């Protein structure tokens, strides 16, 4: 459902819900992760920084969907590695 909401927020699928409502859950998840990393809570972030994190999260969600729907097994992100320029290793069986 998060992948669907992200696709809707980026205008890739049509929906009757206002974009800000579609984007609410993914954005809340990103903010929650940032707070878990010790960032975000009480700190100002530029719009570009938040959008970069949202884009990174979108990639992680897509990678997870590929892992679940195929035989590929990629290195999952952790709280420490998400939103970083990390190396992803994929084992295709």
Image (cartoon, rainbow, N blue to C red):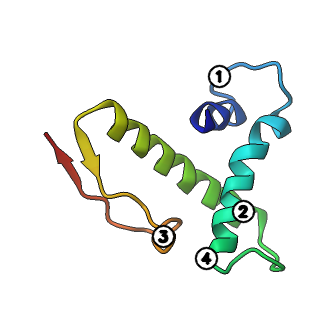
> At 32% across and 65% down in the image, what residue appears?
87
Residue 40 horizontal/vertical position (percent): 74, 74
Q: Which of 21 and 51 is in front in this view?
A: 21
Q: Mark 3 points at which residue?
A: 84
Cα–Cα span, label 4 and label 1: 31 Å
What is the quadrant of residue 85 in the picture? bottom left
Question: Which structural element holds mark 3?
Answer: loop
Q: Mark 4 points at which residue?
A: 37
Cα–Cα span, label 4 and label 3: 12 Å
The answer to whether 73 is drawn above or below residue 56 in the figure is above
Cα–Cα span, label 3 and label 1: 28 Å
Q: Name the residue under label 1.
A: 13
Instruction: Tell me: 80 left or right of 25.
Output: left
The answer to whether 39 is drawn above or below residue 63 in the figure is below
Residue 14 horizontal/vertical position (percent): 71, 19
Cα–Cα span, label 2 and label 3: 15 Å
């Amino acid at each position: 459902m998060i992948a669907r909401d992200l696709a809707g927020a980026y205008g890739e699928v049509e929906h009757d819900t206002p974009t800000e409502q579609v984007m609410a859950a993914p954005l809340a998840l990103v903010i929650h992760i940032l707070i878990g990393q010790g960032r975000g809570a009480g700190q100002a972030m530029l719009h570009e920084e938040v959008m970069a994190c949202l884009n990174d999260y979108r990639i992680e969600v897509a990678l997870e969907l590929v892992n679940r729907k195929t035989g590929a097994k990629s290195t999952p992100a952790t709280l420490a590695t998400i939103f970083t320029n990390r190396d992803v290793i994929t084992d295709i069986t």
